[in-house]
Amino acid sequence: MSFLAAVIIAIVLVGGIMTWGDGGFRWFTDRWNRK
Amino acid sequence: MSAGMVRAWAACFLNFVPLLWLIVLAARQQSRDVAFLWIATSFALGGVADVLAALGLGWAVAGHVYPLGQSALIAAVLLDKPTALWFLGLLGWVAVGSLLIWPTAPDVPLHVCAWVSLGWVANRVRPIGPLWFAIFCGFGLALPCYLWFVATRSLDAWVAMQAAYAVGVGFFCYAASRTRTALAVV
């Protein structure tokens, strides 16, 4: 069952990154470039 | 520290090299497209899984599911986002199916499906140049080595797997150094 739990956590985590990550990555890159 | 531990931590560190290389490039005023950060994060997921496994508490299972995240994150760069989310969902179902069909080693079919499908996705966008080699070596070439390792649990197989991965990481760093254009899909 831990495998299934890990799959669910991975999907939520990666789905979250894919949904909001672009903004986060761009924010990081913009901040770095402005430095 | 034993030789085995040194090898394990070196392999763990290898996963973070792409992210560190992007930081080095950024520090030298050579910021790369966001897509490189996605792919570097995908490589780093393997390292996070290694660290979680090293911490114990049953987190070793992270090492079984991380290819799902790796493939989905790279697909998010190479495909459009809705398709990549579908891809992630599909891999989730593959994982559930693997658990039903092969409960003793569900990670094996998941690794095969995640990495083979990634090779297919990468092949569709082959003009990405050296980055294609990074994905092909880091995942495509590592797959037979991984299956060899699963079958034998030998040190040779483990070293071969890490070597394939290291070549992939090397090509990523090369691609990041050379490519100045935006990959931009996401």
Image (tube, coloured by chain):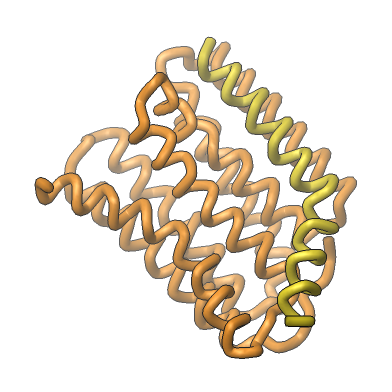
Chain colours: A yellow, B orange
The quadrant in which residue B41 appears is bottom right
| Residue sitting at x 69%, y 28% | B92
Q: Residue furthest front?
A: A35
Q: Position of residue B95 (x, y in %)?
A: 61, 25
From the viewer's perspective, tell me whether residue B176 is left or right of residue B12. right
Q: Residue furthest right?
A: B82
Q: Position of residue B90 (x, y in %)?
A: 74, 33
From the viewer's perspective, tell me whether residue B76 is left or right of residue B139. right
Pick the residue in front: B125 or B159: B159
| Residue sitting at x 36%, y 31% | B55
From the viewer's perspective, tell me whether residue B177 is left or right of residue B53. right
Q: Is residue B65 above or below residue B179?
A: above
Q: Is residue B25 above or below residue B10?
A: below
The quadrant in which residue B30 appears is bottom right
Callout count: 0
Q: Position of residue B100 (x, y in %)?
A: 57, 12
* Quadrant including the C terminus of chain B: bottom right
Pick the residue in front: B129 or B177: B177
| Residue sitting at x 45%, y 49% | B47
Q: Position of residue B173 (x, y in %)?
A: 51, 77
| Residue sitting at x 41%, y 54% | B142
